[in-house]
Image: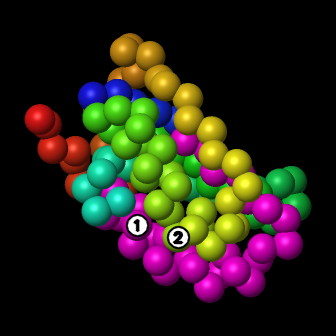
Amino acid sequence: MAYFLMRSMHNSGMEALREKHRPQHREWVSSGGDGLVSVLIGSALTDSAGAAQGNFGIIEAHSETDARRFAEGDPYAKAAVVREIELTPLPDTFQAQRITEPMSPPLRRT
């Protein structure tokens, strides 16, 4: 198991498309991509004027491949709202237990 910081940067001018897919995006996140990952925390990324630029999440996954599958399976990514996905492995010292209310169910241990 590993933790990743995931940043999904959005294409500009996608406000209407983002709004259209927001309910499916939230379902995807709350399910952890149907159990593919556990989403510990996440939020929108905005510019100084409050306009959406993307979203981020801290996720737990069995592998970086699973983390990427989760990010690429997001309805925002499938609808071409996302222009770039960045995954950064977090160190073994990352204190996940300090996040008290994860956004999706815990990842099943294998």
Residue 80, placed above or below residue 24: above
Number of the front mark, 2 or 1: 2
> For the residue labelled by badge 2, is the local secondary structure a helix, a strand or a loop?
helix
Residue 47 image position (x, y, % from top left): 83, 54
Of the pair 44 and 89, the residue shown nearer to us: 89
At a point 84% along the width and 65% down the height, the residue shown is 12
Can the viewer see residue 7? Answer: yes
The tag earlier along the polypeptide, 2 or 1, is 1
Dot 1 amino acid type: Trp
Instruction: Please report the residue visible at 44 percent of the width from the left and 16 percent of the height from the top.
Output: 91
Mark 2 to mark 1: distance in Å? 7 Å
On residue 28, which mark appears?
A: 1
Please give the range of residues in magenta: 6-32
Q: Nearer the viewer, residue 60 or 77?
A: 77
Q: Position of residue 28 (x, y in %)?
A: 40, 67
Q: Which residue lies furthest to the left in this view?
A: 110
Local crowd size for mark 1, using a 10 Å CA cut-off: few (<14), some (14–19), many (≥20): many
Query: On the rendered image, what quadrant is the N terminus found in?
Result: top left
Q: Label 2 is placed on what type of residue?
A: Pro
Q: Are marks 2 and 1 in contact (CB under 8 Å)?
A: yes
Look at mark 2 in the image and give the residue it sits on. Answer: 75
